[in-house]
Image (cartoon, rainbow, N blue to C red):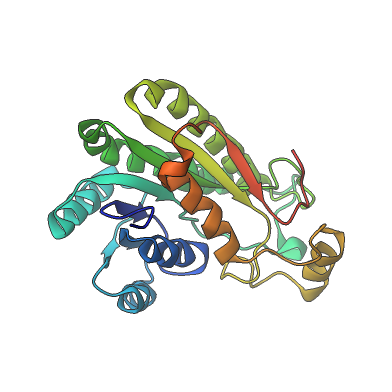
Amino acid sequence: MSSLDSQVVVISGASRGLGAAIARAAANEGASVVVNYFQSEAKADAVAKEIGEAALPVQADVRDADAVRDMVDAAENHFGAPVTRAVHNALIDFQFDAENRSTLEEIDWDEYQVQTEGAVQGALNLMQACLPSMRDAGAGRFVAIGSNLVQNPVVPYHDYTTSKSALLGFVRNAAQELGPEGITANMVSGGLLQTTDASAATSDEVFGIIEQTTPLRRVTTPEEVADAVLFFLSPWARAVTGQNLIVDGGLVMK
C-alpha cells in the first residue's frame, strides 16, 4: 500500500511547474488528485491526461471562495471520497526577474495586494472549503508553498516575499487551532527552482550563483520540492505541524 492510497488531494495551481510535479508525485503514491488551474486549461488537461484516471482538472480562481468550494464539491463527487489533503501552491501573476522587479521606492500597494490575495486569501479559501470533510474524517493535511526568500531575501521581491511571510503566519495559526482535531498545517519553502514558468525570466548568471553557493552545488528542481510536500501529506508526518521546511539544497539553514 502506498502512503496516499484512497486519499483525495487538491493542489492549487497544478497545471505547470511545482504544482504539476506535486500532482504527479501524489498520484504515484496512490492519491486521486485535483489539478487546479486558473487560466491554463490546456496545460492542466495535459497533466491530468498524463496521470490518468486518478486526476481531475478543475478550473477555479483561488481568490474566489465560491469557486474553491465548488471545486472541492466536484472532486468529492467525482472520486466518491472526501478531500482530506490540500496543497496551496497557486501563484498569481509573478515572475522572478531580478533586473525588472519593483523596487521599494516605486512599488505600489496594488502589487502587494495581488500577491497577498493569492497567497493568504487563497489559502483561507482552500482551507475553509476542505475543513468540513477533514473534520468528518477526523484528520487532514494542509500544506502551503512558501519561499526561502522569507529567511534570506537575497533579491528583495517585496510583494512576493511579504505575502509568503503572511502565509507562514496563516499556517501556524491554523496548526494551533486545528491540531486538537487531528488536522495538521505545514509549509514547504523552496528556493529558486529550475525551471518553472515563474523562474523562466531568471538569468543564467543568477542560476549559476545559486549553484555555486548552495552546499549541494546544484539548483533545486520542482520534483525535489514535491517529495518534501509528500512527506507532509503522508502518515509519516502525523506528529508534525506548524513547521516550515526549507528545501533548497542547504542554501538557507534554519
- Observer-nearest of 203 and 233: 233
Name the quadrant of the N terminus.
bottom left
Report the label total.
Answer: 0
Choose between 6 and 183: the one closer to the eye. Answer: 6
Question: x%, y% of residue 162?
Answer: 63, 40
- Position of the C terminus, as image quadrant, is top right
Q: Position of residue 59 (x, y in %)?
A: 29, 62
> Residue at the location (49% across, 33% down)?
171
Q: Quadrant of residue 44?
A: bottom left
Above or below, 136 against 72 in this view is above
Residue 159 vs 39, above or below: the answer is: above
Left or right of residue 203: residue 130: left
**Horizontal placement of 75 versus 213: left or right?**
left
Residue in the foreground of this view, choosing between 237 and 120 = 237
Q: Residue at x 50, y 48 (%)?
A: 231
State whether residue 229 is above or below residue 219. Answer: above
